[in-house]
Amino acid sequence: MENKFERCKNYILGHRALVEKGFEILQPLLKDYLSDAEMELLKSNIKVHDESKFSSDEFFARVNYYHGEKSEENLKKLKSAEEKHKTTNPHHPEYWAAKNEEMPRVYIVEMVLDMWTFGLRDNNPREIFDFYEKNKDEMPLLGSSRKELERVLKMVDVAIDEETHQKSKNKVHKPCENV
C-alpha cells in the first residue's frame, strides 16, 4: 500500500506522463509552429516538467494538504507553495507577468500541455476548452501571449479531431448480418 509521500510523488510523475502524452499527440502540428531549437527546449522541459514540486516546500505542502489534514494552516502553506510554483516556473503566465514580459511560444505550448492533462486523465480531451473559457480572465497574459495561446489551443482541437478520426478508422467493423 502506498503511503502519502509515494501517492504524492506518483501523482506528480503521472501528471508529467500526461504532459508527455499530450506532446506526442500535438507534436506533428508543432513542427510548423516551433523552431528546431524551441522544439528541443520543449522536449527538455517536458522531461523535467514540474520538477519544483519535488522541492521540500512544494512537496510537503501538497502532501500535508492533499494526503493529510485539510486544515486552514495546511491550506495556507499549499497556497503559498502554489504561488511560488507559478512565479518560478516559466510554463506559468504568472512567471512572465512578474517580469512584465510576453510569454515565449515554447512555454505557451508547455502551459497548454499542462492544462490538457486533466482532460487526458479523465478521457475527456476537449475539457481543456471549458477550462480555458472558465479561467482565461485570470491568466495574466501580456501582449500577443493570449493570441498565441489560442493559436495553440486550435492546434489541440485539430489534434483531437485527427486522433479521433484515426481511432475510428482503426476500429474493426463487423459486416452486417442477415436479419
Image (cartoon, rainbow, N blue to C red):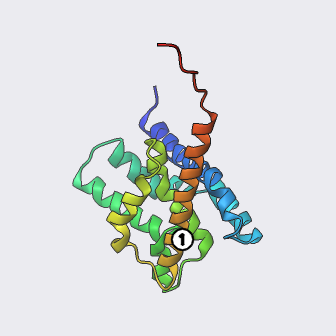
Query: Would residue 38 be visible to someone looking at this image?
Result: yes
Q: Residue furthest top?
A: 179
Q: Residue furthest left?
A: 72
Q: Nearer the viewer, residue 51 or 134?
A: 134
The residue shown at (36%, 58%) is 130
- 63 left or right of 148? left
Q: How many marks?
A: 1
Question: Where residue 161 appears, x then y in whole percent?
Answer: 54, 51
**Which residue is labeled 1 in the image?**
151
Callout 1: 10 Å neighbours few (<14), some, many (20+)?
some
Q: Nearer the viewer, residue 8 or 124?
A: 124
The residue shown at (34%, 74%) is 137
Q: Secondary structure at mark 1?
A: helix
Question: Where residue 36 appears, x then y in whole percent?
Answer: 76, 69
Q: Nearer the viewer, residue 78 or 149?
A: 149
Report which quarter residue 174 is drawn in: top right
- 125 left or right of 20? left
Query: Would residue 52 be visible to someone looking at this image?
Result: no
Q: Nearer the viewer, residue 172 or 152?
A: 172
- 47 left or right of 174? right
The residue shown at (62%, 70%) is 106
- Above or below, 90 relative to 122: below
Kind of residue indicated by mark 1: Arg
Question: Where residue 55 appears, x then y in whole percent?
Answer: 52, 56
Report which quarter residue 43 is drawn in: bottom right
